[in-house]
Image (tube, grey):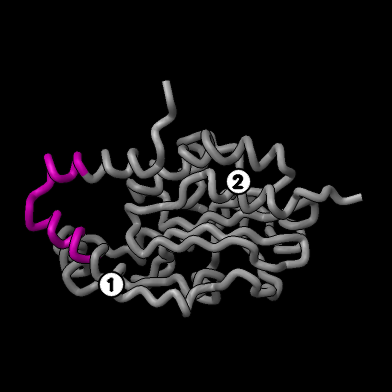
Amino acid sequence: MSRKSLKERLADLHAERVRTWDPAALKINVDQRRTLVETADPARWIQVGDRLDPFVLRDVEGGDLPLEALIQRGPAVLVFFRFAGCPACNIALPYYEEALAPGLRDLGATLVAVSPQIPERLGEIKTRHDLSFKVASDPDNALARRFGILYTADEASQAAQRAKGGFIGDTTGTGTWELPQPAVVVIDHERVVRFVDVSPDWLVRTEADPVLEAVRDITLVPAE
């Protein structure tokens, strides 16, 4: 049996919401995602060819993950996601475990899933899905901000969360409404960005094949 694409898995999530959610709540969700797509400005995002300054992420299992360590043995693949309890993220990361991680290991690349959520709360998604790749915190959204991929929930979304007694800043531990848009960034051994895919709509995310193709292009000529 063929593996379901990420698009199909996320479509199933949306279909379930259409069946089970209150129409007003569903409208807030759909409207927010549509607005993010309509107002997206790709010129603000990190670009292929950009050379990155050093950065440091925090491994949920402890310790730091500096850029130089991530690219020491091959390309680094960063997958930005929102937070450990995000339903779409709990579909995307297991998909990447199945469809992306094995191929990247064969190519000598390092896969890291990145969220602003504090490590103490973020680690649960790695444990829940027994992920083989690194999961790391981007403190204060510093790297996502540099990459131009942050968004802030609109007023309707904020009001809906508050009505349920929620605040995403409490969930993430950042104290703000800012979250990264789902994105995949591939970085080569010279700190140069070789692939970027940003998804303003968090129910649209990067499939494995384009990422694997980008990494293969980097590793076609093995290092001596």
Residue 116 spot, x, y in % from top left: 48, 63
Q: Which numbered dot is residue 212?
A: 2
Q: Distance between the residues labelled 1 and 2?
A: 29 Å
Observer-nearest of 38 and 171? 38
Residue 12 spot, x, y in % from top left: 26, 38
The residue furthest right is 224
Left or right of 93? Residue 161 is: left
Residue in the image at 57% along x and 50% along y: 211
Left or right of 93? Residue 14 is: left
Residue in the image at 28% along x and 43% along y: 11
Say how many tags the image has.
Answer: 2
Which residue is tagged 1?
38
**Which of pointers 1 and 2 lies earlier in the amino acid sequence?**
1
Q: Give the range drawn in magenta.
A: 15-32
Quarter of image, res 49:
bottom right
Residue 86 spot, x, y in % from top left: 35, 50
- Looking at the figure, which quarter contains the N terminus? top left
**20 within the magenta span:** yes
Observer-nearest of 5 and 158? 5
Q: Residues within 10 Å of mark 2 (few under 14, many from 20)?
A: some
